[in-house]
Image: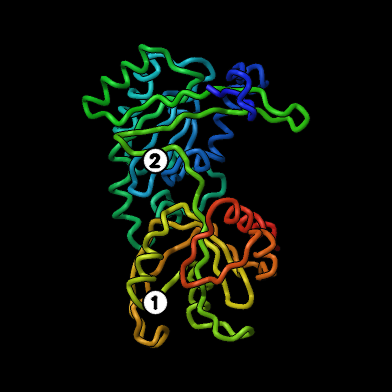
Amino acid sequence: MIYEIHKNGGKPPHQLEPSSLKEQQWREKKLEDYLFQHLRQFVSVDLMVIGQSSPGEKADLVALDQEGELWLFELKKIEGKAENLLQVMRYSQIFGALKIDDLDKLYRDNHEGARDSLAVAFCNYFGYDPDRADAWGEKLAKRHHLVVMADGADDATLGAVAHWQRHGLAIQAWPYRIHDGNEREETFYIDLPELLIEGKRISRKPAPVFFVNTSRKKKGVRSEMENYMIKHECALTTGGERWISKILNIPAGAKVMLYANQIGVIAKGIATPARRKTTNLNEFNGDTAHFLKLREFRELKQPLSVQNIFKAAGKQYRVSSVYELLGDAGKNVWEAAIQQP
């Protein structure tokens, strides 16, 4: 529930009246299509959405996490019922019988123009070595997580969820509420509670934002580390445990910007789970380098200058090897980087 609270404290709370998808002129299918594109913005677990519903017994949304575990989402435009849990459990049973070729077909059917197999695409998405795609293909979708997303949930549904959880099933109801938004901007609000499965928070907290310094020594000359980062679409640190631990603690899904001294942001990407260390005597003077693969990587044609970083953040920074930008400052600098050509 969403309540309106007057800042002067002189009035009692006023509960906002709920709306519905129908009142917002959205069909269930439109919500499904929207989540197909934006599910990652609603969950903290980094998910690769591989498919959505089609005629027959199929879950509305099908995704893989970084461990290769399968996520099945069943969407309802009305209040959830206990039988919806049986429905998604049936889908889990069906997917349990599928082979990698079946999952590959689902992926290709939902990603027009996909050239790579699902296993290769999975490795590329999460930053794993594509040469190990066959090994990953044997692991994918062996464990399932089931989520029913509906406009509220009745007591029978909540009781059934608790029952199946006690018996070891990774299942959860995720009830949402729709509220009127800004008519002029043609928006509405969706209120989502915390989503917890097996004691793990799944619902999204804002993705953290980081600078990783490219160790440029001279304004017009790229460092060897910087060249490596651009070529391999990654973030990198060398040296002592202090910086090693910082880059290893950047979570998957975090927003990472490569920062060149005196220049500003020169590239951006999303952190993957892939972490590794390597020693290359020629490139890193014998230092052990710790490597964080980035996806959705883009080198900026025009760097986001130091001055514009300060302007977007509303403060000045002295960027060390790995530096987290907290709060609105991180969000604003990331948005400014996105807008750069």
Q: Quadrant of residue 314?
A: bottom right
Contact (Cβ within 8 Å) of mark 2 with mark 1: no
Q: Depth check: 148 or 5 in front?
A: 5
Question: Picture coordinates of residue 159 (x, y %)?
Answer: 32, 16
Q: Is residue 192 above or below residue 120?
A: above
Question: Picture coordinates of residue 302 (x, y %)?
Answer: 69, 69
Amino acid tagged 1 = Thr
Q: Depth check: 85 or 215 in front?
A: 215
Amino acid tagged 2 = Leu
Q: Secondary structure at mark 2?
A: helix
- Measured Cα–Cα span from mark 2 to mark 1: 39 Å
Q: Depth check: 148 or 314 in front?
A: 314
Q: Secondary structure at mark 1?
A: strand
Q: Is residue 283 above or below residue 35?
A: below
Question: Picture coordinates of residue 37 (x, y %)?
Answer: 56, 40
Say how the picture is coloured.
Answer: rainbow
Q: Residue at x 53, y 37 (%)?
A: 36
Q: Quadrant of residue 45?
A: top left
Q: Residue at x 45, y 45 (%)?
A: 48
Residue depth check, mark 2 versus mark 1: number of the one nearer the observer: 1
Res. 80 mark? none
* Farthest residue, direction right: 184
The residue labelled by disc 2 is: 103
The residue labelled by disc 1 is: 238
Q: Residue at x 43, y 36 (%)?
A: 62
